Image (spheres, rainbow, N blue to C red):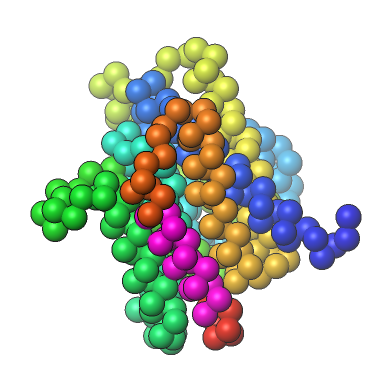
Amino acid sequence: MKRSVWPYVLLTLAPLFWSGNVVLARAVRGDIAPMALIVWRWTIALAILLPLTGAELWRQRRALRAHWRILGVLGFLGTFLYQALSYQALTATTALNALLITATAPLLTALLHWLVYRETITRRLGVAICLSLVGVGIVISRGDVQLLLGLRLNPGDLLMLAATLVWAGYCILLERYRPAGVSSTGLVSVLALVGLVFALPVYLWQSGGGVGFTMVWPNILTLLYMGVFASVLGYLCWNEGVRRGGANLAGLFYNLLPVFGVGLAIVFLGEDFTLYHGIGAALVFGGIVLGTHAHHNSGSA
């Protein structure tokens, strides 16, 4: 395989793995608590990563010490807060809604770039953002304008929108402040450890109240998938794909997550694809195509 093909392969695999994570989290919402998903997901990931990256992390210890603040922020946002919000959202909304809402991530990233760094938003990108947000409004209101005007929104949809905003912030910080001297595998290992440090006390406190999960094979297999594919392989593919192909290309490929996920949710969860889903999805993806084209033409990162 030619070297130039690898970014496309890696950036396709990551959303595929992550879409399975969303669908499985929705499927086990009544069996495994959100915080249990986070703790066991990253525990399994670390059990795989640390034997492979332990010596590497020791060699990179000076870089890790020098960048401990940004590593802590990235771990808190990317492997704890984003997961906590999204898993909790999936207890109150469908996988289809959650996946369609995640499609706004590239456009939310552009908005944050403008708000924080004052990067120019072109007219085309502005139209794209509005178009995509209208699509999200249709999805979370179930096509009921009165519901949207009355602000009686599903809490799960709002949590998913908050999670997507957190992910956009994480991606901006990762792009701008990714620690020099820390490898892709080392970065995933450290962020997994940071996420676990934040999640474990909450999980232990909740476990005292009987919150956890039952050790049955469907739950165990779900956690293994999340630990191996959604965590280790997903993050490694994403980080390496960003390194090889750049942030612009990665942002475009992130939009494959809802594409893969909607198909998986319909096939494996039996969720209905309604008219409002179709209209909302068309507006969301129309906005994304317009927005990524405008972003590419502007030459910004």
Would you identify the image quadrant in which residue 63 lies?
A: bottom right
* Left or right, 14 with reference to 273: right
Would you identify the image quadrant in which residue 135 lies?
A: bottom left
Quick one: quadrant of the C terminus?
A: bottom right
Number of on-image labels: 0
Please report the residue visible at 57 percent of the width from the left and 53 percent of the height from the top: 256
Looking at this rendering, what residue extends furthest in the right direction? 1
Is 124 inside the magenta-drawn segment? no
Please report the residue visible at 49 percent of the width from the left and 20 percent of the height from the top: 219
Q: In this rendering, does residue 210 appear at all?
A: yes
Q: In this rendering, does residue 165 appear at all?
A: no
The magenta region covers: 280-294
Front residue of this view, candidates 16 and 212: 16
Please report the residue visible at 73 percent of the width from the left and 61 percent of the height from the top: 7
Please report the residue visible at 23 percent of the width from the left and 44 percent of the height from the top: 154
* Left or right, 156 with reference to 131: left
Q: Vertically, is 85 above or below 177?
A: above
Q: Position of residue 122 (x, y in %)?
A: 44, 86
Q: Position of residue 300 (x, y in %)?
A: 55, 82
| Main SS of residues in magenta | helix
* Left or right, 80 with reference to 44: left
Q: Vertically, is 180 above or below 155?
A: below
